[in-house]
């Protein structure tokens, strides 16, 4: 028998060697013997008695044997003869119920952000054939659809998206009222949230948010010079001065749920720490999440190689702040880290990058159901209608095609259990197909995953209480 | 585990399986963890041995394999510890005089603990 290394990523956290195993997504801390065995094995095939011989002067034989058993058992190493498990694209054993429905209540927006995928040069929806606003009936049908597809899920999430959601405030109100009535009848719970650009916030709307315990995310890119570069009205005027008093009022009054800012990073807007400080510390958002703009590579706001490098440095620096703050037992609002820590904690090993088309669906203004809100309104990515239900044949076809087993490029990547190829919409915009893995940020994802693993294992060693929040 | 310290939830699950050494769980697909997996039988039921059966005339002469072969099915391929001595520790030479079961089975000695 010969032994060979399994698939893993090794890293140091809190001064100790650790290993992140693939595809199980288990994280183990290594002791001296297990570290020595993995070192001795390297990338070669070695017989167990050879390994025992090489380590004889450092560890008792029984220890080496025990450790080999443990490494085999956890699949950190494997026997060369043992067949590798073959990953096949297969459907989940049971149909996964719908947990989140995103309603694109309008495709219209009062801003003209230059990078917007709903409006900009890279849009995929069919604006000509669709109504600009969802009507009350479609919203009610969507709510019925949501409950019908939610199976035995007790709690369902209804999310409003746009366009600018608050342009269709009337339909938001009636849809939520109806959802609550139906939830009552069906013995379920409905949780509501929305994303807004904050330009239309006013007292009556904030009252409604408070009264209905709405989760709110504000799309905002930072301080005035960042916000006003691309988040502009159609006449080119920036939106910062208009929204700041409204955002402050929202944050002051609506305190029952944490309110987050969602930042789009572009070539000229990459100072993550500076943006974070403005939004978190000066304006008072509870947390701030960042995502690079989704765009074809040739657009002038697209982030290029050196931009990704700079963005990673900024992310890593802010992650270190997250760690330091968390070690002190205080809250830090960098939500990108928190989301990844949650996945690492649970040991999520993904067959799909996200819940789109599985537990999450998006509804277009006319009631067409698509993979997610980003595809709502695209006929190519339609999975049914709210009245006719999900087209399960199409959904199954989609699930088989997008399974990680079909992403050959990902097969040797240690970060695939966390990434699974990345956002479908990003892939569709970059490569023209939702099935393509996002190869332009592979290295970025691996380095970012490595950082998050280090943060996780350090917290696990020094502040295990911090990780309790992910137990739910 | 003594040399690997489980850090996240998935690692703890792996550790639990390692500690448990549950023969049913080790079959991989069925067991308390995965009640819906297919049952993959191991041992005598898998290799189609006549077992403790009789032929159509009520005797053992017409079975497709000599009935004495059952002995080996029980103690070599089956994980279930029945009716045969412990050949790993206590009685490793138990069948050493029994070259062909159907001829030599009388040479197998009694074993006393």
Image: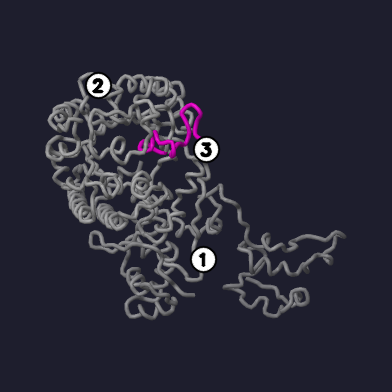
Picture layout, residue A384 above or below residue A80:
above
**Counting residues from the N terminus, which is met first, the one under dot 1 or under dot 3?**
1
Name the one closer to the observer, A58 or A358.
Answer: A358
Q: How crowded is mark 2: few (under 14 residues within 10 Å), some or many (20 or more)?
A: some
Circle 1 residue = A83
The numbered dot on residue A392 is 3
Q: Give the range drawn in magenta.
A: A371-392
Q: Position of residue A463 (x, y in %)?
A: 24, 50
**Counting residues from the N terminus, which is met first, the one under dot 3 or under dot 2?**
2
Q: Position of residue A63 (x, y in %)?
A: 38, 72
Picture layout, residue A145 above or below residue B111:
above
**Counting residues from the N terminus, which is met first, the one under dot 1 or under dot 2?**
1
Foreground tag (1 vs 3)? 3
Mark 1 touches mark 2? (CB < 8 Å): no
Q: State the image quarter where residue A237 is shown.
A: top left
Chain of the residue on which disc 1 is drawn: A
Q: State the image quarter where residue A313 is shown.
A: bottom left
Q: State the image quarter where residue A294 is shown.
A: top left
């Amino acid at each position: 028998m010969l032994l060979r290394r399994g698939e893993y990523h090794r890293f140091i956290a809190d001064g100790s060697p650790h290993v992140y195993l693939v595809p199980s997504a288990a994280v183990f801390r290594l002791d001296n013997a297990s570290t020595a065995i993995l070192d001795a094995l390297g990338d070669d095939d070695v017989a167990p008695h050879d390994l025992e011989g090489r380590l004889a002067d450092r560890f008792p034989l029984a220890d080496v044997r025990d450790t080999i058993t443990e490494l085999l058992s956890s699949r950190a190493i494997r026997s060369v003869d043992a067949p590798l498990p073959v990953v096949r694209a297969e459907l989940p054993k049971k149909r996964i119920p719908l947990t989140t429905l995103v309603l694109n209540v309008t495709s219209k927006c009062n801003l003209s952000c230059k990078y917007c995928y709903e409006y900009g040069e890279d849009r995929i929806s069919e604006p000509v054939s669709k109504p600009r606003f969802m009507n009350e009936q479609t919203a009610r049908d969507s709510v019925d659809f949501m409950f019908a597809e939610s199976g035995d899920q007790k709690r369902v999430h209804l999310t409003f998206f746009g366009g600018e959601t608050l342009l269709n405030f009337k339909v938001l109100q009636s849809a939520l009222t109806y959802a609550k009535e139906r939830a009552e009848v069906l013995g379920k719970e409905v949780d509501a949230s929305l994303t807004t650009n904050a330009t239309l916030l006013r007292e009556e709307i904030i009252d409604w948010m408070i009264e209905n315990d709405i989760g709110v995310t504000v799309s905002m890119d930072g301080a005035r010079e960042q916000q006003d570069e691309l988040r502009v009205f159609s006449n080119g005027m920036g939106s910062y001065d208009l929204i700041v008093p409204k955002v402050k009022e929202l944050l002051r009054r609506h305190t029952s749920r944490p309110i987050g800012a969602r930042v789009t990073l572009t070539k000229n807007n990459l100072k993550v720490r500076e943006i974070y400080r403005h939004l978190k510390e000066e304006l008072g958002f509870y947390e701030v999440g960042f995502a690079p703009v989704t765009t074809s590579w040739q657009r002038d706001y697209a982030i290029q190689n050196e931009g990704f490098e700079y963005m990673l440095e900024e992310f890593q620096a802010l992650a270190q702040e997250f760690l330091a703050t968390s070690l002190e037992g205080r809250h830090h609002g960098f939500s990108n880290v928190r989301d990844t820590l949650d996945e690492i904690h649970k040991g999520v090993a993904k067959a799909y990058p996200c819940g789109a088309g599985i537990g999450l669906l998006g509804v277009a203004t006319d009631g067409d159901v698509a993979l997610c809100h980003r595809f709502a309104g695209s006929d190519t990515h339609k999975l049914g209608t709210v009245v006719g239900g999900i087209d399960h044949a199409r959904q199954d076809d989609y699930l088989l095609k997008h399974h990680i087993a079909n992403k050959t490029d990902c097969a040797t990547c240690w970060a695939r259990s966390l990434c699974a190829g990345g956002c479908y919409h990003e892939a569709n915009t970059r490569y023209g197909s939702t099935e393509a893995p996002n190869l332009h940020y592979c290295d970025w994802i691996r380095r970012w995953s490595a950082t998050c693993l280090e943060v996780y294992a350090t917290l696990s060693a020094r502040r295990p209480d911090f990780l309790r929040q992910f137990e739910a | 585990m003594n040399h690997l310290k489980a850090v996240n939830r998935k690692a703890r699950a792996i550790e639990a399986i390692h500690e448990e050494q549950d023969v049913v769980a080790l079959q991989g697909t069925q067991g308390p963890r995965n009640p819906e997996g297919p049952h993959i039988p191991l041992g005598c039921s898998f290799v189609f041995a006549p077992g403790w059966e009789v032929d159509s005339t009520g005797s053992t002469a017409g079975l497709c394999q000599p009935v004495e072969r059952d002995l080996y099915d029980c103690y070599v391929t089956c994980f279930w510890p029945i009716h045969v001595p412990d050949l790993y520790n206590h009685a490793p030479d138990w069948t050493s005089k029994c070259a062909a079961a159907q001829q030599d089975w009388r040479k197998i000695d009694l074993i006393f603990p």
